[in-house]
Amino acid sequence: MRSIDEAQRRIEEYIRFYNEDRAQRKLNKLTPVEYRNQLVA
């Protein structure tokens, strides 16, 4: 059985991936971070 800390780390990694690194169709296949950077540039 894996530890609670391991589960917490994996969940946090997935949340970061989902919110920052995942290319989204509605953002013209950009990641949210790339899209925000494009708006402020």
Image (cartoon, rainbow, N blue to C red):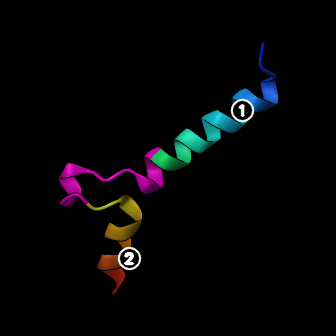
Residue positioned most to the bottom: 41
Provide the secondary structure element on which disc 2 rests: helix
Residue at 60 percent of width and 43 percent of height: 13
Left or right placement of residue 33 versus residue 2 in this view: left
Q: Residue 16, labelled with which disc?
A: none
Residue at the spot of label 1: 8
In which quadrant will I find the N terminus? Answer: top right
User: What amino acid is at disc 1?
Assistant: Gln
Q: State yes or no: discs 2 and 1 in contact (Cβ < 8 Å).
A: no
Q: Position of residue 11 (x, y in %)?
A: 62, 34
Magenta span? 18-29
Around disc 1, counting alpha carbons within 10 Å, would you say few (fewer than 14), some (14 to 19), or many (20 or more)?
A: few
Q: Mark 2 Cα within 10 Å, few/some/many (few <14, many 20+)? A: few
What is the quadrant of residue 5 in the picture? top right
Q: Please state which of the two labelled residues, at mark 2 or mark 1, is closer to the viewer.
A: 1
Q: Residue drawn 18% across and 60% down?
A: 28
Regarding mark 1 in the picture, which secondary structure is present there? helix
Three-letter amino acid code of the residue under disc 2: Asn
The residue at which mark 2 appears reads as 37
Residue drawn at point x = 43 percent, y = 55 percent? 21
* 12 left or right, relative to 24: right
Q: Does the magenta stretch include residue 25?
A: yes
Residue sitting at the far front: 1
Please say if 33 is above or below 1.
below
- Indicate whether 24 appears above or below 28: above
